[in-house]
Image: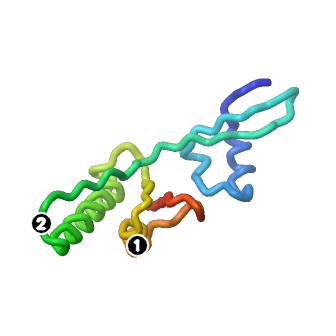
């Protein structure tokens, strides 16, 4: 079995494949091929993993406001091509805490899986 990088033509052909939700042009795409037949492919894409939010003292309102401003600052950094020069335009996070799940919905994050609290946001 041969493992190789996908060709530009393969990336274009596979971009509308069901279940593909990342940008194949921006990702590293590895292909498994056996005697000229493509068996499958795996994508590796650079991403910002946004965790771990740590809040110290202060009232509940102050902690809530600080958390919101921290997340918005990270989003602003990722959106701005002058500060984010590496081209990564999406982020993800994991959580089990209900307040964070609620925040993710309000901040426009997308839940990836039904039983796992994995959230993403694209810019």
19 horizontally vs 88: left or right: right
Disc 1 and disc 2: Cα gap in Å? 21 Å
Mark 2 or mark 1, which is nearer the start of the sequence?
2
Q: Quick one: which residue is furthest to the left in this view? A: 58
The nearer-to-camera label among 1 and 2 is 2
Label disc, if present, on residue 102 of the rendered structure: 1
Q: Position of residue 91 (x, y in %)?
A: 43, 54
101 horizontally vs 54: left or right: right
Label disc, if present, on residue 16 of the rendered structure: none
The residue nearer to you, when weighing 16 against 50, is 50
Which residue position is annotated with label 2? 58
* Residue at horizontal 25 percent and vertical 64 percent from the top: 67
User: Image height check: is 12 above or below 72?
Assistant: above
Q: Position of residue 59 (x, y in %)?
A: 14, 71
The residue nearer to you, when weighing 11 against 103, is 103
Q: Quadrant of the N terminus?
A: top right
* Residue at horizontal 32 percent and vertical 51 percent from the top: 52
| Mark 2 residue crowding within 10 angstroms, few (<14) / some (14–19) / many (20+) | few
Q: Position of residue 112 (x, y in %)?
A: 56, 61
At mark 1, the secondary structure is helix
| Mark 1 residue crowding within 10 angstroms, few (<14) / some (14–19) / many (20+) | few
* Residue at horizontal 59 percent and vertical 46 percent from the top: 25
User: Image height check: is 110 above or below 10?
Assistant: below
User: Image height check: is 91 above or below 42?
Assistant: below
The residue nearer to you, when weighing 79 against 45, is 45
């Amino acid at each position: 079995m041969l493992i190789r990088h996908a060709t530009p033509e393969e990336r274009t052909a596979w971009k509308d494949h069901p279940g593909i939700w990342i940008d194949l042009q921006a990702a590293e795409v590895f292909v498994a091929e056996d005697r000229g037949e493509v068996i499958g492919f795996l994508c590796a894409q650079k991403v910002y993993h946004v965790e771990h939010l740590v809040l110290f003292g202060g009232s509940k309102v102050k902690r809530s406001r600080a958390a919101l401003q921290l997340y918005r600052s990270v989003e602003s950094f990722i959106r701005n091509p002058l500060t984010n020069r590496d081209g990564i335009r999406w982020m993800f996070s994991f959580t089990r805490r209900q307040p964070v799940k609620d925040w993710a919905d309000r901040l426009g994050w997308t839940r990836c899986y039904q039983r796992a609290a994995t959230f993403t946001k694209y810019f």
